[in-house]
Amino acid sequence: MTRGVLLDLAGVIYDGETAIPGGVDAVARLRQAGLAVRFVSNTTRSSKQTVLQHLEALGLTVTKADVFTPAHAAREWLLRNGRAPYLLVHPGLEPDFLELPVRDKRAVIVGDAGEAFTYTVLNDAFRELNAGAELLALATNRTFRDADGGLSLDAGPFVTALEYASLKRATVLGKPSQAFFLSALASMNCPPDQVIMVGDDAEADIAGALRAGISSALLVRTGKYRQGDEKRFDPRPTATVADLAAAADWIIARRD
Amino acid sequence: MTRGVLLDLAGVIYDGETAIPGGVDAVARLRQAGLAVRFVSNTTRSSKQTVLQHLEALGLTVTKADVFTPAHAAREWLLRNGRAPYLLVHPGLEPDFLELPVRDKRAVIVGDAGEAFTYTVLNDAFRELNAGAELLALATNRTFRDADGGLSLDAGPFVTALEYASLKRATVLGKPSQAFFLSALASMNCPPDQVIMVGDDAEADIAGALRAGISSALLVRTGKYRQGDEKRFDPRPTATVADLAAAADWIIARRD
């Protein structure tokens, strides 16, 4: 029996500024079918506030508690572990890290910083790590679908570079971290075997969710999806469908 | 019986523009003792011509054939494999890649590009890889000792980033590649068990040489050496000595 659905955002509900056809309506149909819906996004170029505004502009009704972002998880980690952030993130994400208490110890936080990934900034972050800072990865995605339609480097390659240089392992806060999926499940009061994940990233969304114990994961052929992705990572998707509209059909047809 | 010696350059013979005390004299003593000497450098910020001029300025007599650099190995790889280079290297290295034949297929060549590692350039290189280019690493060193005395990011972290993003494995041309060590041995007509390597990098120089079959490797406490380096990587150095002068003493005392 399915009681909850986790949805990725970029590449599933929207591509850049544009809604993916049928996506907003699919969310409404899932909710009308009595399913709890949460949004689990690895996008680390926008603050949570910006993500919420974007979803509202598309016509989706969402509360702050419906959306799970790695930056929010990182903020909670910093408070829990008593560390100040050394940010290697996109400027758009900085609002999520305001007004944290002053601490001596630090944690380097790596997101999808884009053009802000310069040699100097990466080297400074490496020196922080060498001086005792911890390494937090908001996400480990290899690539994202860029504005020009091509794939571009996401946060993952830069996390790997810093791990290699510092001989430290990053704590991953976004997908595919099990803790990240589980925090979304907890908010729905659903065990993993009553939840379905829908995403366009065969690795972070699909293999990640299945490895976290979620029973089913649907790969959509929108966003960053490339032919053959369903066979590229293990575990493989429960099913591969055209888009979120088709995913909603699949879920509603099999919900009991 | 020892017949040949391989010497690293930066951190062993010189630090930046400055000669390490006793280094040039140590090379002369090794040669006077009848040992063949070759220089195996992973420095990828200077062309071979510049390296030779630098050594001459320090008072060392060296020929082109005495010095082995990853760029030279890369040039030979390109000619052998019929590929044109897509260079992600320091501007100082570009002279080593002039006048290569025009080819359709490409190879991304990653060196220690320093400030030239921008997001845009790394992303362009990733897209070349995604379009079918091969990945060549001039070196995989994690760090080097920078002008300010601190450790800075070398080529390795950026090679790892591109491997992670493209799901391709780099062909490594400099140390610790076995082929690189063996090409230097071949020029001396020495089998690996008659050669000693001296370097300041416990991983690329020492563990690399020993893994390539070279019988002994001496770690010097100059250059990038940090306390405890001798215990950080396997196999561990045959001995750890103060500097190249002490290494020459060690080698000459045990040469038979």
Image: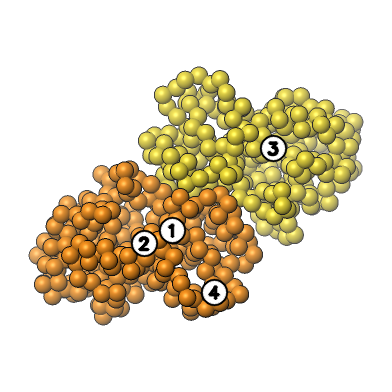
Chain colours: A orange, B yellow
**Are the residues flagged by discs 3 and 2 in contact, CB closer than 8 Å?**
no
Q: Residues within 10 Å of mark 2 (few under 14, many from 20)?
A: many
Q: Which residue is mark 2?
A: A46
Q: Secondary structure at mark 4?
A: loop
Measured from the top left, where is residue B199 in percent x and y?
74, 44
Q: Residues within 10 Å of mark 3 (few under 14, many from 20)?
A: many
Distance from Cα at disc 1 to Cα at disc 2: 8 Å
Residue A253 vs B141, above or below: the answer is below
Q: Residues within 10 Å of mark 4 (few under 14, many from 20)?
A: many
Q: Secondary structure at mark 1?
A: loop
Amino acid under disc 4: Arg
At x 45%, y 29%, the residue is B106
Q: Chain of mark 1?
A: A
Distance from Cα at disc 1 to Cα at disc 4: 20 Å
Residue A176 sits in quarter: bottom left
Residue B250 sits in quarter: top right
Amino acid under disc 3: Ser
Residue B245 visible in the current orientation: no
At x 52%, y 26%, the residue is B78
| Comes first in the chain, label 1 or label 4 | 4
Quarter holding the N terminus of chain B?
top right
Q: Which residue is mark 1?
A: A90
